[in-house]
Image (spheres, grey):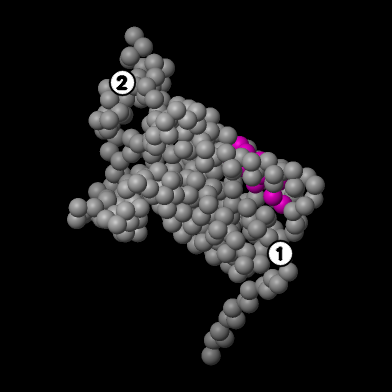
């Protein structure tokens, strides 16, 4: 009787076919998260009376950071033995194998996190806006993006969990390696976890009306996000064989972020993180002069 409750998952990962072009659910979710996140960011900047042109620049930095960081993270952390060879290293940038375009299928969230931190440092050097102030707002949007990305993984029938007898187990029919037995839909677990984190973070931001102690929300967010990742990794099939290691690769990579979050929370409570929006050297963008009609 329990078998009747199992979900047989066989959805086409391609959302729309237009001739030779195919729009995947994963790509749509990724783009939707960026667009929706951009709108949220604009509202935050307007609320704090910060020039919205900075939001435009920040989103561009973020987009490049996520794509480049996530790609490098996957290639270096999870498939280094393949990509760090004389025959395949160039596939990191140009994903073509055996004459066919494979696409950037390998993306790692830990690599994206590292990329975002580097991008925000570059953004600070150029714009002179307090990095902690930016991170307290960006983290809310990233949580939403993570929810959509993991939902995209579910649509792709990838990154699933171990076999389970729980009634919500999913049989991933599109992947022969998944086998005929139901598995934990770990992608959905993570997606729901990140969505809850987005809602809670957004609720805190709204309750405080954007008046946060710099770095504190981001610190708690790091702890929550990567603890979710560590806990749910116990249900996920390991993509890298670490032998008898208690933790998987994803869990080991999450530990430094949890510790970083704890340090930031302590530093924020002790008043060690710079408050305010702008830092020394900030120059407001020049207003574009409207051309007078002759």
Residue 251 point in image, percent of width and height: 51, 36
**Of labels 2 and 1, the one closer to you:** 2
Any mark on residue 245, and which? none
Toward which corner of the image does residue 10 lie, by quadrant?
A: top left
In terms of sequence position, does the residue under pointer 2 or pointer 1 come before the other? 2
Closer-to-camera residue (217/204): 217
Residue 60 visible in the picture: yes
* Residue name at image x 49 percent, y 57 percent: 65
Determine which residue is flagged by label 1. 278
146 falls in the magenta region: no
Q: Which residue is mark 2?
A: 181
Residue 215 painted magenta: yes
Q: Judging from the image, what secondary structure is the residue with disc 1 in? A: loop
Furthest residue toward top: 1
Q: Within 10 Å of the Cα at label 1, are there few (<14), some (14-19), or many (20+) other Cα atoms?
A: some
Image quadrant in which you'd find residue 44: bottom right
Region of the chain picked out in magenta, as a range? 214-225
Indicate the position of residue 258 as horizontal and vertical percent values. 61, 40
Where residue 265 sits: x, y (%)?
71, 43
């Amino acid at each position: 009787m329990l078998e009747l409750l199992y979900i047989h998952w066989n959805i086409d990962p391609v959302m729309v076919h237009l001739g030779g072009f195919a729009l995947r659910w994963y790509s749509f979710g990724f783009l939707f998260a960026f667009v929706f996140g951009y709108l949220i960011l604009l509202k935050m900047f307007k609320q704090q009376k910060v020039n919205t042109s900075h939001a435009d620049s920040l989103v561009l930095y973020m987009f490049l950071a996520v794509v480049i960081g996530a790609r490098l993270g996957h290639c270096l952390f999870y498939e280094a033995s393949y990509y760090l060879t004389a025959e395949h290293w160039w596939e990191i940038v140009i994903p073509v194998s055996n004459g066919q375009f494979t696409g950037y299928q390998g993306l790692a969230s830990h690599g994206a996190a590292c990329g975002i931190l580097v991008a925000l440092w570059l953004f600070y050097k150029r714009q002179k806006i307090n990095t902690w102030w930016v991170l307290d707002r960006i983290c809310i949007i990233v949580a939403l993006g993570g929810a959509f990305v993991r939902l995209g993984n579910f649509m792709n029938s990838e990154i699933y969990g171990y076999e389970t007898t729980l009634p919500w187990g999913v049989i991933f029919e599109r992947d022969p390696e998944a086998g005929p037995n139901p598995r934990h839909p770990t992608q959905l677990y993570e997606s729901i976890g990140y969505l809850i984190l987005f809602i809670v973070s957004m609720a805190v931001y709204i309750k405080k009306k954007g008046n946060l102690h710099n770095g504190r929300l981001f610190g708690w967010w790091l702890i929550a996000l990567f603890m979710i990742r560590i806990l749910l990794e116990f249900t996920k099939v390991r993509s890298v064989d670490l032998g008898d290691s208690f933790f998987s690769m994803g869990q080991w990579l999450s530990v430094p972020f949890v510790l970083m979050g704890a340090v930031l929370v302590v530093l924020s409570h002790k008043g060690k993180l710079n408050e305010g929006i702008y830092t020394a050297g900030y120059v407001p963008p020049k207003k574009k002069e409207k051309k007078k009609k002759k």
